[in-house]
Amino acid sequence: MKKLLIVANWKMNKIKDEAKNYLEEFLPLVKDAKSDIVIAPSFALLDYMQAKLKGTGIELSSQNMFFAPTGAFTGEVSADMLKDFDVKYVILGHSERRQYFLETDSFINKKVISALSNGLKPIICVGETIVQKKADLSKEIVKEQLSIILEGVTEKDVENIVIAYEPIWAIGTGFAMNASEVNEMAEYIIKLVQTLLQTTKKVKVLYGGSVNEDNASEFFNAASISGALVGGASLDAKKFAKIILG
Ligand code: PEP
């Protein structure tokens, strides 16, 4: 049986009181869960979440980071700062970062290299727009994104990176992609990463895009999908626990 990796992306939601209520409900529900669980709260909650998650087996992720180690970069957060809060993963290249903060593949590449060299595991988001999908360009787009984002990443890091395939048209829309189509894309991504990094090892591919408690098992049952990156449904403790418990 594969061990699933299920990641909550809280985006810009929740203050301490809300996180407290959430964890009081969520932690007892998932205490015997068999999957690896990761929560990505806002930077502002990392200190609080680090304390609350200690000893639970649930890992912390950040939703972003900057690639420079220190310096005059107002508003940014470095890998070292994240490690100070025992953060293990970092979501990079989310489509909302690309859309609202104009992040490019080569910019994301610098972050990936910095994350890896600092011992953080990047959860790298890729995926096509609806226009690109309709033009049958999904694989080409993902190939272009990963070819740039993974420049300089070596075979020894295959186990330290996670690819989140997130078709942009499926994020937050309620229209999840069909599981067999996602599985086909996951197989494609695994082979692509094998070629790019010259390895026979298989990278973990998560699916993200309107995953909820009703459809999650379809993705988890697909052979090449290793888990999910969950946005909206992860904000509700019961729903996220249901996704994890099946
Ligand atoms: C996401 O933002 O990464 C995401 C998958 O969101 P949602 O689950 O709400 O579609």
Image: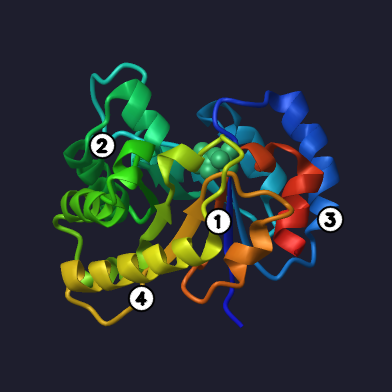
Question: Which image quarter is the N terminus in?
Answer: bottom right
Q: Residue 228's mark?
A: 1
Q: Secondary structure at mark 3?
A: helix
Disc number at residue 29? 3
Say whether marks 4 and 2 touch (CB < 8 Å).
no
Residue lying at 55% horizontally and 56% vertically, measured from the top left:
228
Between marks 3 and 2 in the image, the one whose residue lies nearer the viewer: 3
Disc 1 crowd rating (10 Å Cα; few below 14, some 14-19, many 20+) is many
Report which residue position mark 4 lands on.
202
The label number, if any, that marks residue 69 in the structure image: 2
Q: Is the residue at mark 1 in contact range of ligand 1, meaning its CB lies under 8 Å from it?
A: yes
Amino acid, disc 3: Leu
Residue at 32% over, 37% down? 131
Q: Give above or below for 214 relative to 156.
A: above
- Amino acid type shown at disc 1: Ala
- Would you say 20 lies left or right of 136 here? right
Q: CA distance from mark 1 to mark 4?
A: 17 Å
The answer for how far apart the CA atoms under marks 4 and 2 are is 30 Å
